[in-house]
Amino acid sequence: MAFAIKAEISDPRAVAFVFQAQKTMYGGKLIVAGDIVFVFASENEGGKGLIARAIVTSPEAVPRKAGIARQTPRVSIAVRRVALAKRPLGRDTLKRFKAWDDGRPETELNFKFYRQATNKIVGITDRTAAFLDRFF
């Protein structure tokens, strides 16, 4: 399974990234070492969308806080960049894909990242991973 993360990125050309206590949705909590992750620089923090493809080098589940009934699972991960995106892909491109049941990779990304605009790690389908590979 492949994953995508949308997060604040201070240096888009860094060779490695560390993401602490990231919210997970749509299977994001299943991320393990060796998985492919597509890195999106969050537009909410001044980023421009897809920037890199990376390999997870260190995942660690964040323990739930005691006394809180409903909590979104969180994971801290370290990743090593293996490729920089050669073409842009971000909110402006994806926002027009709103037919949630059309099966398009663009719609999957729009739904998982931008319908609820918080930063997060998400699981993506093989079809969407193949679509994202074309940007490298």
Image (cartoon, helix red, strand yellow):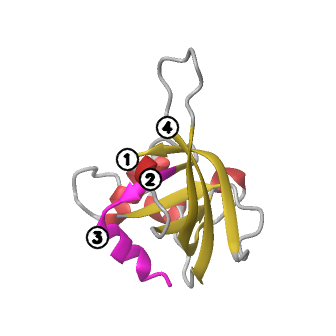
Position in image of residue 19 (x %, y %): 65, 55
Q: Are marks 2 and 1 in contact (CB under 8 Å)?
A: yes
Q: Are marks 4 and 2 in contact (CB under 8 Å)?
A: no
Quarter that holds the N terminus: bottom left
Mark 3 residue crowding within 10 angstroms, few (<14) / some (14–19) / many (20+): some
Residue 27 in magenta?
Answer: no
Query: SS of the residue at dot 2?
Result: strand
Q: CA distance from mark 2 to mark 1?
A: 5 Å
Position in image of residue 110 (x %, y %): 42, 55
Q: CA distance from mark 2 to mark 3?
A: 14 Å
Position in image of residue 49 (x %, y %): 58, 65
Instruction: Determine which of the numbered discs, if any, sits on residue 122 in the image.
Output: 2
Left or right of residue 18, residue 52 in this image = left
Mark 4 residue crowding within 10 angstroms, few (<14) / some (14–19) / many (20+): some
Earlier sequence position, callout 3 versus callout 1? 1
Residue 126 in magenta?
Answer: yes
Say which residue appears at 57% left-offset and 50% top-offset. 60
Q: Say if 91 sits above or below 85 in the image.
A: above
Earlier sequence position, callout 2 versus callout 3? 2
Residue at the disc numbered 1: 26
Q: Which residues are magenta?
A: 121-136
Residue at the disc numbered 3: 127
Say which residue appears at 37% left-offset and 49% top-offset. 27
Q: Say if 70 sits above or below 75 in the image.
A: above
Instruction: Determine which of the numbered discs, if any, sits on residue 113 in the image.
Output: none
Query: SS of the residue at dot 1?
Result: loop
Say which residue appears at 31% left-offset and 63% top-offset. 125
The residue nearer to you, when weighing 97 against 129, is: 129
Most extreme residue toward the right, as rendered? 10
Residue at the disc numbered 4: 73
Q: CA distance from mark 4 to mark 3?
A: 25 Å
